[in-house]
Image (cartoon, rainbow, N blue to C red):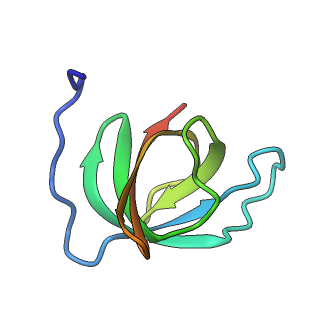
Amino acid sequence: MKRNSVRFKPDEGTYALIDTDADTKEFDPNLPVLVFSEAHKGVGIIALTTPKLQVGDPLKIQVGNLPVLKAEVRWREQVDPQVIKVGIMFLE
């Protein structure tokens, strides 16, 4: 798959907060994650293995000091039994 935007390495320790309940207006994060890749249209994150964050899942995300954005899980890779990498695309 060809990427449409340039990826760059985030500052060390950059994290994001995810609210997996995309149906509410309020932002109530229930999943903290580390950011390993940033782009204009999304982020790559690392998280502990969870049944959440499946491909196609809608969510709300706040990356660092940026505003909360609506987003969607685009891909998911199991790194080992405890860790996943997930690609998230911003929808706004």
Residue at x 33%, y 63% (from the top left corner): 35
- The answer to whether 53 appears left or right of 45 in the picture is right
In the rendered image, which quarter contains the C terminus?
A: top right
Q: Residue at x 25, y 22 (%)?
A: 1
Give the residue at x 48% y 37%.
Answer: 90
Q: Is residue 7 above or below residue 60?
A: above
Residue located 64% across and 47% down the image: 59
Q: Quadrant of the rendered structure where residue 58 is?
A: top right
Q: Residue 32: percent from the left, percent from the top?
A: 53, 73
Q: Which of these two is toward me, 67 or 62?
A: 62
Q: At which x and y percent is residue 71?
A: 56, 40
Q: Residue furthest right?
A: 24
**Above or below, 52 relative to 11:** above
Q: Is residue 68 visible?
A: no
Relative to residue 16, is residue 45 drawn left or right? left
Q: How many marks?
A: 0
Tell me if 60 is positioned left or right of 1 in this view. right
Question: Relative to residue 91, is residue 45 drawn left or right?
Answer: left
Q: Nearer the viewer, residue 35 or 55?
A: 55
- Whether residue 16 is visible to the viewer of this picture, yes or no, is yes
The image shows residue 51 at horizontal and vertical percentages of: 64, 61
The correct choice, above or below, for 88 with respect to 66 in the image is: above
